[in-house]
Image (cartoon, rainbow, N blue to C red):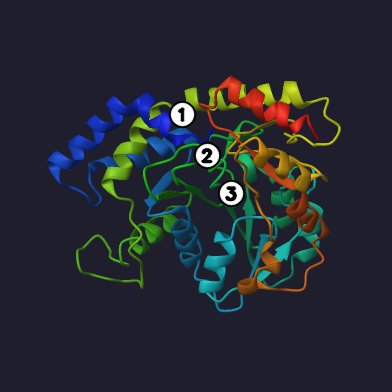
């Protein structure tokens, strides 16, 4: 049993993927080939965004998004404390002043009430992280920042395909960034990402920034940029998988429902809470339990893989250490555990996981 089964996905789509890669190899157009533009067009159509710029990773996408905003050193950026490191990492690289905010216990997502208290007149950017496949309460967040001249960025690395009140993740915030890391809902065969926006000026600037700050004229550099392009081979892989995304999302929902139905009576765990009007892409299936150490022992004994997202919150990390009163984030770091999950997980393997959890 694998924690996330990406090998089966390749086998399912192998013929189409191999042919798509082969076409790139024959053309030898490995950098910004035609497949990159095709993918960007299909991605923006899927999300409903006006513009899409593919990037070398989700993290680089966040870096480009922030770099496009002409922020000054020590401008404030608010980031959830219970999240992957990428938003904090790129904010630190750009010398922004990071403020960590607590999250909601039920959903793991940024808490709008606590966010409101963190905002000052120096706040320029808020990064909301759509975690484990679900979007946060965008209605409340957008209401809070209305008329405050604050840019809202969605870190959608774990939520491609998700919806909030029938709006697609990657097309709700001012700028959204997703990741195509191999284990994501839409994953390539290496690193990759994309930035989405409806702002033409931001789109143009990010397009330049990802290619060494180069304008439409070769070797003319109007900005200090980066080498942050998506490889054409990765675009070729993603084009095939994007054609299958609706099927993949249905499979994820089906496998998640199997866990829900067979674990709902277990009083020693708390299942993922999907808010009303939300559609989760179920990037992971993450439960909470006050008996995590005991569950880990059971998993190890039964050779069941698992993962802890996240064992240490961002404000406790050496590189980003701050005094923190974010109690919910700290509790989640002790109670959250992700169990084996993918569109391709076999029912017999799910049953093995369920039986193990029910031994708690």
| C-alpha separation, residue under disc 1 versus residue under disc 3 | 22 Å
Say which quarter of the image contains residue 61: bottom left
Q: Which residue is mark 2?
A: 160
Q: Is residue 299 left or right of residue 12?
A: right
Q: Is residue 95 visible?
A: yes
Q: Residue at x 81, y 44 (%)?
A: 291
Task: Look at the picture and state if 23 lies above or below 350.
Answer: below
| C-alpha separation, residue under disc 3 versus residue under disc 2 | 14 Å
Q: Few, some or many C-alpha atoms within 10 Å of disc 3 (few <14, some 14-19, many ≥20)?
A: many
Q: Few, some or many C-alpha atoms within 10 Å of disc 2 (few <14, some 14-19, many ≥20)?
A: many
Q: Quadrant of the N terminus?
A: top right
Mark 3 secondary-structure assignment: loop
- Pointer 1 and pointer 3: residues touching (CB < 8 Å)? no
Q: Position of residue 252 (x, y in %)?
A: 57, 27
Q: Which residue is mark 1?
A: 245
Q: Which residue is mark 3?
A: 173
Q: Is residue 35 left or right of residue 92?
A: left
- Pointer 1 and pointer 2: residues touching (CB < 8 Å)? yes
Q: Nearer the viewer, residue 288 or 93?
A: 288
Residue at the outermost front position: 301
Q: Position of residue 83 (x, y in %)?
A: 64, 55
Q: Earlier in the sequence, mark 1 or mark 2?
A: 2
Q: Nearer the viewer, residue 126 or 226?
A: 226
Q: Earlier in the sequence, mark 3 or mark 2?
A: 2
């Amino acid at each position: 049993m694998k924690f996330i089964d990406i090998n089966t996905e390749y086998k399912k789509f192998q013929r189409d993927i191999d042919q798509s890669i082969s076409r790139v190899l024959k053309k030898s157009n490995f950098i910004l080939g035609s497949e990159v533009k095709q993918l960007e067009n299909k991605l923006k159509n899927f999300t409903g965004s006006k513009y899409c710029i593919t990037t070398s990773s989700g993290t680089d996408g966040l870096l480009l998004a922030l770099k496009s905003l002409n922020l000054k050193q020590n401008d404030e950026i608010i980031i959830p404390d219970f999240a992957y490191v990428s938003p904090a990492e790129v904010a630190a690289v750009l010398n922004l002043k990071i403020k960590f905010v607590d999250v909601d216990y039920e959903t793991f997502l940024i808490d709008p009430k606590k966010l409101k208290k963190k905002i000052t007149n120096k706040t320029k950017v808020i990064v909301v992280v759509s975690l484990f496949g679900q979007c946060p309460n965008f209605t409340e967040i957008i209401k809070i920042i209305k008329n405050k001249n604050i840019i809202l960025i969605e870190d959608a690395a774990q939520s491609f395909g998700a919806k909030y009140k029938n709006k697609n993740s990657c097309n709700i915030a001012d700028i959204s960034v997703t990741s195509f890391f191999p284990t994501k809902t839409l994953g390539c065969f290496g690193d990759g990402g994309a930035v989405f926006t409806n702002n033409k000026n931001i789109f143009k600037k990010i397009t330049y920034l990802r290619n060494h700050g180069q304008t439409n004229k070769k070797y003319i550099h109007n900005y200090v940029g980066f080498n942050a392009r998506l490889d054409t081979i990765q675009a070729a892989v993603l084009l095939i998988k994007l054609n299958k995304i609706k099927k993949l999302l249905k499979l994820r929902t089906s496998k998640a429902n199997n866990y829900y139905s067979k674990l709902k009576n277990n009083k020693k765990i708390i299942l993922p809470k999907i808010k009303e009007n939300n559609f989760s892409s179920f990037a992971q299936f993450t439960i909470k339990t006050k008996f995590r150490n005991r569950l880990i022992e059971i998993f190890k004994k039964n050779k069941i893989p698992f993962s802890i997202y996240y064992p240490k919150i961002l404000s406790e990390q050496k590189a980003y250490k701050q005094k923190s009163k974010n109690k919910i984030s700290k509790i989640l770091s002790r109670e959250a555990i992700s169990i084996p999950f993918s569109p391709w997980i076999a029912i017999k393997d799910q049953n093995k996981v369920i039986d193990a959890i029910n031994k708690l």
